[in-house]
Image (spheres, grey):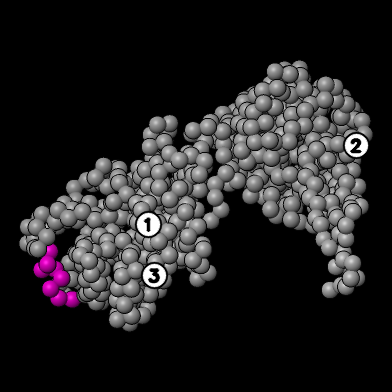
Amino acid sequence: MSTDRLNVLKTYKLYVGGKFPRSESGRVYEVTDSKGNWLANAPRSSRKDARDAVVAARKAFGGWSGATAYNRGQVLYRVAEMLEGRRDQFTAEVAAAEGLSRAKAAAQVDAAVDRWVWYAGWSDKVAQVVGGANPVAGPYFNLSTPEPTGVVAVIAPAGSSLLGLVSVVAPVIVTGNTAVVVADESAPLPALSLAEVLATSDVPGGVVNVLSGSAAELGAPLAAHQDVNAVDLAGTAGDTGLATELEVAAADNLKRVLRPAPTADWSAAPGTGRMLAFLETKTVWHPTGGLGAAGSSY
Amino acid sequence: MTVGYARRYAPLVTMPPSAAPALADVTASDAALRRFLHGLPGVDAVGLDARAAALGTRSIKTTAKAYAIDLAISMIDLTTLEGADTAGKVRSLCAKGRNPDPSDRTAPSPAAVCVYPDMVPVAREALAGSGVLVASVATAFPAGRAPLEVKLADVRAAVAAGADEIDMVIDRGAFLSGRYLKVFEEIAAVRENCARVSGGAARLKVIFENGELATYDNVRRASWLAMLAGADFIKTSTGKVAVNATPSNTLVMLEAVRDFRDATGHQVGVKPAGGIRTTKDAVKYLVMVNETLGDDWLSPHWFRFGASGLLNDLLMQRQKLSSGRYSGPDYVTVD
């Protein structure tokens, strides 16, 4: 191979509404590997990018939450297939970002794909687990079903650039929510590459929106945004001050808030907690048909 | 570019500038009118688009933005023109006109509520005492394909029912086939029928349907034609076709009303309608008005937005400015 070939460097971009825009602010910042070597420039999103992402997520919510659970599951399986196809790329990015050996990085990517498949399987099962028929003292059917809460802002966890990311994004969207994800500031490249996977795997534009930049700068407008229904503060685990500040801002319109666990082990079995945190329960009453003592019916 | 083409043009057709009666000559016959309208300088389409785009790049922030938002709200003709309109829907729109943001009573009211003629009595009653005007489309809106008597009866009915403003459509078929005098006479006839029995007259807005006029030259000609015939407002479109108000075709009309005032001393309003949905769009139009016409037109009496969805976006932006938080569609009324 000729040695005088110039490298083609990749321009990483945001993922908003199914498109790959640059930051509205025009800013970028240097992303380095774990040893401080320059890797790439990532966009530094502004609050207006966050605003645009929420608009895109809201727009996508109707279609995604209205799709059948089976259909959502199939789309998410497809994402896992595409992730698998880019295994080498993700392995390299995770290795650089987290300073892992190639074998360990590959194990992380495998775990991320498995995690995604595991959540995809839940799409048409979660309703049976947390919904059901309630016994009531009257001639009614009383049925509870879980429904997605809406637009969820996710501050992705630091330190686990792909497995951690997948572990917070998949449970949000599998039940029909749409997400605005703020990638880990120090290791955003796997998140921005995941956006490319999502864009090429039947996930409707706007269902997942990925922003790179500072969690503090983007978290504040997202937590205060009146059109965001819930926030996942996983990425603020190391910063109690910021977590508290965002929780206070989120209280304003009664958002659901998932507080960060003090120590998160992303490789452990996740359980259903993260899915159930972003669901609302809808209960309907329906007459059983009998119209009282006379025993008549319709 | 700021020198009005009419001012340059006026001496050539022996029109003394600033004398309206002199322009009467140009409508003496179909031939004279065609000569005048085709004598208007052509529009440089590329330059026009570039100018309109350049004016859309201004950044309007903080206090100027707050001013622009309130001004834009007060310029809206809140519109519902659907076959499925009901009295209830018109009343709920009127309630919104009275009090656009129930959570913030300082929000200004829109200029008018715009409905079909049969809904005018409902709107009139619902808006009584609010200061919000009632506008009505008429003349077989939106196609305008009806005999003249039917169109005039439509106008009279709307005025009698209490419409403060009439939005008429021109006969695009006649205009495009070059029968300018027919269009002129029709506008003049509608204008006569805008007179109220009690004295005074409803203000007349003339809709061109720019999307059907094909060229910017035609938009300029239609603007002059309508103003010569006595329009109080010229309006871009019905909102019922694919191309509605665009910054470019509105800019042509803004330049026409500027030049018309230079030539005759008579001021005419402009109303872009259709396709203006966001605060950003609205502010672009206001910048264009300010840069082309100046302060004189920056009031609801001289500039309007024909829109319905725009109001919600303006209200959300207004809430953002006052609270510092981004608002959402849950915090404004559903139309």
Q: Is A106 positioned to the left or the right of B104 in the image?
A: right
Determine contact: label 2, label 1, CB under 8 Å: no
Question: In the image, what residue occupies the spot 27% across and 63% down?
Answer: B202
Please, which chain is the residue tagged with disc 1 on?
Answer: B
Alpha-carbon distance for marks 2 and 1? 61 Å
Question: In the image, what residue occupies the spot 85% across and 54% down?
Answer: A143
- The answer to whether A83 is drawn above or below residue A91 in the figure is below
Instruction: Tell me whether marks 3 and 2 sit on the same chain.
Output: no
Residue B242 or residue A66, whichever sits in front: A66
Residue B117's mark? 3
Residue farthest to the front, as pictured: A293
Residue at the disc numbered 1: B128
Is A23 included in the stretch rendered in magenta? Answer: no
Please, which chain is the residue tagged with disc 3 on?
Answer: B
- For label 2, the crowd category at 10 Å Cα-Cα, with few meaning under 14, some 14 to 19 and many 20 or more, is few
Which is the main secondary structure of the residues drawn in magenta? helix
Mark in the foreground, 3 or 2 = 3
- The answer to whether A88 is drawn above or below residue A282 in the figure is above
Mark in the foreground, 3 or 1 = 1
Secondary structure beneath disc 2? loop
Please state the extent of the stretch shown in magenta in the rendering. Answer: B23-30
Secondary structure beneath disc 3? helix
Residue B254 or residue B78, whichever sits in front: B78
Residue at the disc numbered 2: A271
Q: Amino acid at mark 3?
A: Pro
Secondary structure beneath disc 1? loop
Is B27 included in the stretch rendered in magenta? Answer: yes
Q: Amino acid at mark 1?
A: Ala
